[in-house]
Image (cartoon, rainbow, N blue to C red):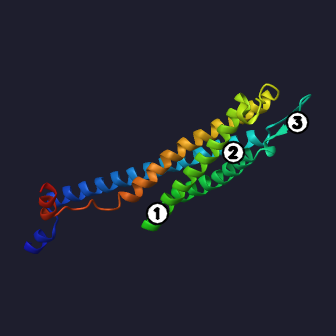
Amino acid sequence: MMDKRASSPSPMDIMGGGSRDEEDGSFSNTVTTMRTAETLLRLVPVALCVAALVVMLKDSQTNDYGSISYSDLGAFRYLVHVNGICAGYSLLSAIIVAMPRPCTMSRAWTFFFLDQVFTYVILAAGAVSLELVYLAYKGDTDITWSAACGSFGAFCHKATASTALTFVVLACYAVISLVSSYKLFSRYDAPVANSSDIAAFKG
């Protein structure tokens, strides 16, 4: 009887086990929710990049003044290439994030590095395209570059739309970069200050 009583779990053990199970379940649900949110966040740029890409690819106009196409301008060609590569990376990264695998340190560093690179690449594409759109609308008398949008209005409207979509992609990647930065650096412990260091700092 004594052995049987000793081996049976106490009410506190049962309550403690249930509490741990609830905590584990809550943590698992939180991780799943965060994974789903990040996956959706990485899928948003796919649609935006494809939209900006398609709009720019169709950006050409012919009228009595002549003809113009996005392929005539290096900045717009760069924008097309960047949006295509970004769409592919966004889709691939979303698939990887959606997989229920533990996030290793190497994986966290890889996402952090690539997210930072793509953020600045998209920024560069948007900046040079915005400058070109501004010159197309306003011109530049110092270099005798006249405004072209008065003659090629439809071309300028599509270029403006594609550039605006690219900046929305940039905003998405800024948030994605913050997420990947948090996931990486939250793995490191905060530095512990020694008493001697504190005394030397105060002195």
Q: Mark 1 or mark 2, which is nearer to you?
A: 1
Location of residue 133 (image quadrant): top right
Q: Quadrant of the N terminus?
A: bottom left
Q: Quadrant of the C terminus?
A: bottom left
Badge 1 crowding class, 10 Å Cα cut-off, few under 14, some 14 to 19, many 20 or more, is: some
User: Mark number for residue 50?
Assistant: 2
User: Residue 100 location in percent, x, y?
Assistant: 48, 60
What's the residue at 12%, 64% (across, down)?
A: 196
Viewer-nearest residue: 160 or 172? 160
Please, what is the three-letter code of the amino acid marked with disc 1? Trp
User: Residue 115 location in percent, x, y?
Assistant: 53, 54
Of the two numbered discs 1 and 3 on the same chain, state the one appearing first in sequence.
Answer: 3
Please say if the residues under marks 2 and 3 sit with CB atoms less than 8 Å apart.
no
Q: In this view, does 166 lie to the left or right of 189?
A: right
Viewer-nearest residue: 143 or 123? 143
What's the residue at 74%, 39% (across, down)?
A: 55
Q: In this view, does 135 lie to the left or right of 107?
A: right
Is residue 69 placed above or below 117 in the rendered structure? above
What's the residue at 38%, 50% (across, down)?
A: 30
Quote the CA–CA distance across marks 1 and 2: 27 Å
User: Residue 158 location in percent, x, y?
Assistant: 74, 33
Badge 3 crowding class, 10 Å Cα cut-off, few under 14, some 14 to 19, many 20 or more, is: few
Q: Name the residue under label 3.
A: 67
Please, what is the three-letter code of the amino acid marked with disc 3? Ser
Of the two numbered discs 1 and 2 on the same chain, state the one appearing first in sequence.
Answer: 2
Quote the CA–CA distance across marks 2 and 3: 25 Å
Of the two numbered discs 2 and 3 on the same chain, state the one appearing first in sequence.
Answer: 2
